[in-house]
Amino acid sequence: LVLILDFGSQFGQLIARRVRELNVFCMIVRHDISADRVRELNPKGIILSGGPSSVYEPNAPKCDPRIFDLDIPVLGICYGMQLVCQALGGTVGGADAREYGRATLSVSDANSLFRGYPVESTVWMSHGDQVRSLSGDFVPLAATATCPLAAVKHKQRPVFGLQFHPEVAHTPHGKQILANFLRDVCGCQGLWKMQTFVEQTVAGVREKVGDKRVICGLSGGVDSSVCAALLVKAIGQQVACIYVDNGLMREGETEIVRHTFRDWFKADLHVVDAKEQFLSALEGVTEPQEKRKIIGRVFIDVFKHEAKSIPGAKFLAQGTLYPDVIESGGSADGPAATIKLHHNVGGLPKELGFDLIEPLRDLFKDEVRKLGLELGLPEDVIWRHPFPGPGLAVRCLGDVTEEKLSTLRKADTIFLKELKDAGWYRKTSQAFAVLLPVQSVGVMGDGRTYEKAIALRAVQTDDFMTADWSRLPDDLLAKVATEIINRVKGINRVVYDISSKPPATIEWE
Ligand code: XMP
């Protein structure tokens, strides 16, 4: 076990993630954890995270200084380094030049932390303060142009400090430093596996829930499926999974959910058939934001109604991931413009008087996928592209009718099948068909046609905030177009969307 003391860093979870990637189990704990509690937990190492404060401010968060006397290896990062240096006799002050972004690090001591590390390399800095002078007990290990003490080591104790952030991707070799700290200094063997996460989370959920019931919203997407599977493993029939069939799902989606959760996991699955409700509320509505609002409102009504029918429910489980936590952290009331109203069920637990359970809160997407595989979810579910809450309604431009949805579903199914057959599904981040509200002239056989058009959209992205269109092979596009025009009644034209985000968005509405 390695403890990460959190001083309010934006990167706390990223440190945890890197440690997990090195197969070492870690826990993020409050910065003011007592030295006695640390001794009880008996970690092999302690990492002090960065943080937004200045160590010399009166209310700056500190850790229990007795922690440094436990003879447990300590690595202080950024604020953590300033704190440890200050606690052990150094001084910290505002830097002459604040350093944000890339810097070149020169290593002067290639042992311990920097074993196998390039002498000169890029590191990521983000600080206004820095350690000004060391007590005689520390020695410098590396420097940048404006930060002479960019990495330090205590002479007697296993205590290290880094002014830069080894955990971020912009420090290309940062993981090597963490690996050296964990393996060489702390003596961690790297035996931790996702299976251990499952065992620990299962135990935690059982303890929290006791004999109460939990409601888990299931959308069919990766996150909610993994969350539900984990809960079923932990508490079996005590969890009730609610899946709202809004009539806006893709072909076969409801059946996959039913098969996976009811037949395979033997979960208590409530499939609520609310197609009528959604479609009648959407009748004649063409404005995208209006469509989104209606879908969000009906969803909440339907979900609440079903949730109330489950006796003894005290908790609501959500498949919130770590990136969702960061994103919603800053922007909720911020000045950012609302581009699209995203499905928001954030207020639900409170309204229903439920407590929240978020077992995936510490994980990143790829870790959730690994976890899903570990839990035995089918690959189809694990690798499924994201699908928006409002479903096909935002891909059926203009008003939404059963007939249009059926046309769109057929075209979408053909596109995804061809992508999968050609090995391109996993190479794209998201791909789908859009039914356009225009008609154009064509010729089929000897006759004139005047029918609708389908747009195909496929994008590559890491974070869905920006995206580029996928360079699908011509042959593949040609095959998809031919299949759609030949097999989907009412379509005589297929176009491929070659706009990036920004300025376009991924979805069309
Ligand atoms: P845009 O279209 O904004 O989409 O570029 C970015 C990503 O978000 C998905 N999306 C949604 N997801 N509820 C969701 O859960 C929504 O209301 C919603 N709208 C868009 C979209 O599919 C893409 O992955």
Image (spheres, rainbow, N blue to C red):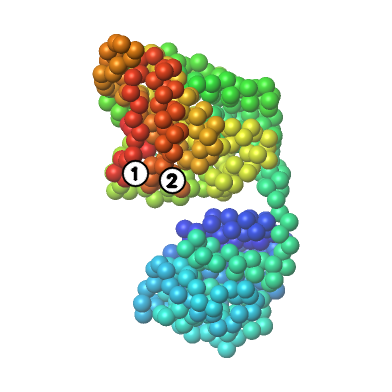
- Seen in the image, is 373 located left or right of residue 149? right
First in residue order: circle 2 vs circle 1: 2
Q: In front here: 383 or 52?
A: 383
In the picture, the disc for residue 91 is none
Name the image quarter holding residue 357. Answer: top right
| Residue at left offset 50%, top offset 42% | 427
Contact check, label 2 and label 1, Cβ < 8 Å:
yes
The kind of residue on which mark 1 rests is Lys
Distance of label 2 from label 1 (alpha carbons): 9 Å
Q: In front here: 436 or 228?
A: 436
The kind of residue on which mark 2 rests is Thr
Q: Is residue 136 above or below residue 69?
A: below
- Seen in the image, is 459 located left or right of residue 90? left
Label 2, secondary structure: give it: loop
Q: How many marks?
A: 2
Label 1, secondary structure: give it: loop
Q: What percent of the width, then of the height, locates residue 114?
A: 60, 75
Q: Residue furthest top?
A: 447
| Residue at left offset 60%, top offset 86% | 137
Please rate how many residues cluster around mark 1, counting C-alpha atoms within 10 Å: few if below 14, some from 14 to 19, many from 20.
some
Ligand 1 has an atom within 8 Å of the beta carbon of the residue at disc 1: yes
| Residue at left offset 64%, top offset 32% | 378
Task: Tell me the quadrant of the picture where the N terminus can be found.
Answer: bottom right
In the picture, the disc for residue 461 is 2
User: Circle 1 is placed at which residue position?
Assistant: 501
Q: What percent of the width, then of the height, locates residue 495?
A: 34, 30
Residue 60 in view here: no
